[in-house]
Image (cartoon, rainbow, N blue to C red):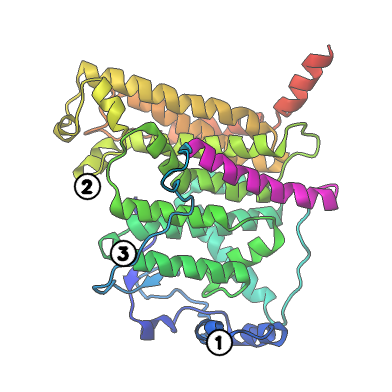
């Protein structure tokens, strides 16, 4: 799917659009500690100016720059490393859960220091507040244009949380655009390595452009860890080198990388309801389940589109169990075997949505509406696939505007549900 327009730039062009404003740079430098010689190169790169306008005349929003990879090959290192030879193999689910535990620990640590998950106070750099406001406003514009329903839901959130979610959304969209956008064919592992290096700078407080500046401010205020962001980039790397998944364990890890990570990024911003009795880990697990469910739904909706690009995001072993092969996918014929296979895949996706439901009620009430809307609308895509008689080769399942409008008040009503953990607690005491 197309998000933002990317343009190839050479190193000399990058300075025209990347970097914080020089005035803010000077303030930052006053507080910098001494750098080792190894970091001097980065220091020079960070001194470029931040252009408040779009990077390019033909693009409404700023976007990432990259240059084509030369002949050299760059080794890839997975964020979640596979087991070394001789070690007991660990399932993808366990690897991902280890990340969930780490994210939950960050929130627990902050909760111990305060009774509620509060936003850190602003420490404004002279002249930076108006620039930062414009950066967040631009993120809001991107979100409003490309995720209208979700954007509408964010308007109920507190201003701080709303802006932070916009910043995270925009970063995720720009990252996805690297391998799914108009210039995806020119994106290389080297470009993704640069994007990850740029992410490190964002978390260190040295953004390149205004959209990065919004994210940099967000991660400085909320207990958001960098690992899910790195893992999303790893999912983009996977798309460059992998077009088949031998089993669901492999596919699960991919779904975590490209979608489950979003839930882990968002929970610290959305907040957990103060009255919730649920463990922090369970709330994160539910957010992860929603991301997995959303991505599985995307995969099932886009089977035909992906096949035309030579990609099959379906477990190979499960296709074989139903007597199907890659050739059947490329032929795009709806048969009884295909219908049976699809019923099984849809059932699995719905299980993830069911797991996510209780977790949504544990979020801060003001943050629930956009999440409920996402859950309900994505689940309806599965209904539409069934309504199309499982023809996801030539028909794209989509939820009509009328159904979307009907889902919004339902999502709003559900945002007032009592946390599931409280309901279970009261049932036990009766």
Q: Earlier in the sequence, mark 1 or mark 2?
A: 1
Q: Along the line of sight, which residue is nearer the eye, 262 or 322?
A: 322
The magenta stretch spans residue 237: no
Distance Cα–Cα, label 1 vs label 2: 45 Å
Confirm whether residue 145 shows in the render: no
Residue on which the image places disc 1: 37
Tag 2 secondary structure: loop
- Near mark 2 (Cα within 10 A), the count class, few <14, some 14-19 or many ≥20, is few
Across and down, in percent, residue 364 comes to 72, 41
Magenta stretch, main secondary structure class: helix
- Near mark 1 (Cα within 10 A), the count class, few <14, some 14-19 or many ≥20, is few
Which residue is farthest top?
430
Magenta region: 92-117
Q: Which picture quadrant has residue 273? A: top right
Tell me: 145 left or right of 245.
Answer: right
Q: Along the line of sight, which residue is nearer the eye, 47 or 42?
A: 42
Q: Along the line of sight, which residue is nearer the eye, 238 or 367?
A: 238
Confirm whether residue 246 shows in the render: yes
Across and down, in percent, residue 13 comes to 37, 83
**Residue 155 in the image: above or below residue 377:** below
Name the residue rendered at 23%, 18% in the picture: 337
Name the residue rendered at 53%, 48% in the picture: 262
Across and down, in percent, residue 283 comes to 66, 37
Tell me: 194 left or right of 311.
Answer: right
Residue on which the image places disc 2: 309
Tell me: 429 left or right of 205.
Answer: right
Can you tell which mark lies on residue 187? 3
Tag 3 secondary structure: loop
Distance Cα–Cα, label 3 vs label 1: 30 Å
């Amino acid at each position: 799917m197309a998000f933002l327009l990317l343009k190839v730039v050479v190193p000399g062009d990058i300075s025209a659009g990347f970097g914080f404003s020089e005035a803010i740079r000077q303030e930052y430098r006053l507080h910098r500690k001494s750098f080792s010689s190894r970091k001097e190169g980065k220091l020079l790169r960070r001194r470029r100016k931040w252009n408040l306008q779009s990077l390019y005349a033909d693009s409404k929003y700023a976007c990432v720059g990259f240059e084509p990879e030369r002949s050299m090959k760059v080794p890839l290192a997975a964020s979640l490393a596979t087991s070394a030879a001789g070690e007991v193999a660990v399932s993808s689910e366990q690897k991902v859960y280890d990340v969930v535990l780490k994210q939950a620990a960050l929130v627990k640590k902050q909760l111990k220091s305060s009774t509620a998950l509060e936003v850190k106070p602003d420490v404004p750099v002279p002249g930076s507040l108006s620039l930062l406001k414009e950066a967040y406003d631009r993120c809001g514009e991107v979100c409003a244009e490309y995720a209208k329903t979700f954007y509408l839901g964010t308007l109920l959130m507190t201003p701080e949380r709303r802006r932070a979610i916009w910043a995270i959304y925009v970063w995720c969209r720009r990252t996805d655009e690297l391998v799914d956008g108009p210039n995806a064919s020119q994106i290389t592992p080297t470009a993704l390595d640069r994007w990850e290096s740029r992410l490190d700078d964002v978390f260190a407080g040295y953004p390149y452009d205004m959209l990065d500046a919004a994210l940099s401010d967000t991660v400085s205020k909320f207990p958001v860890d960098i690992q899910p962001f790195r893992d999303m980039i790893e999912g983009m790397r996977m798309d460059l080198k992998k077009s088949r998944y031998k089993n669901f364990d492999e596919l699960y890890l991919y779904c975590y990388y490209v979608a489950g990570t979003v839930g882990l990024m968002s929970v610290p911003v959305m907040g957990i309801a103060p009255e919730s009795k649920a463990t922090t880990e369970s709330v994160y697990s539910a957010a992860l389940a929603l991301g997995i469910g959303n991505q599985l739904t995307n995969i099932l909706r886009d089977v035909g589109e992906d096949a035309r690009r030579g990609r099959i995001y379906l477990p190979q072993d499960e296709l074989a169990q139903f007597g199907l092969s890659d050739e059947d996918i490329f032929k795009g014929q709806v048969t009884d075997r295909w219908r049976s296979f699809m019923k099984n895949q849809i059932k699995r996706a719905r299980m993830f949505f069911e797991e996510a439901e209780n977790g949504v009620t544990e979020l801060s009430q003001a943050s629930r509406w956009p999440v409920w809307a996402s859950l309900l609308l994505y689940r309806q895509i599965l209904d539409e696939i069934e309504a199309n008689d499982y023809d996801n080769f030539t028909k794209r399942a989509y939820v009509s505007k009328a159904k979307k409008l009907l889902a919004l008040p339902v999502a709003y009503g559900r945002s007032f549900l009592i946390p599931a953990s409280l309901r279970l607690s009261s049932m036990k005491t009766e």
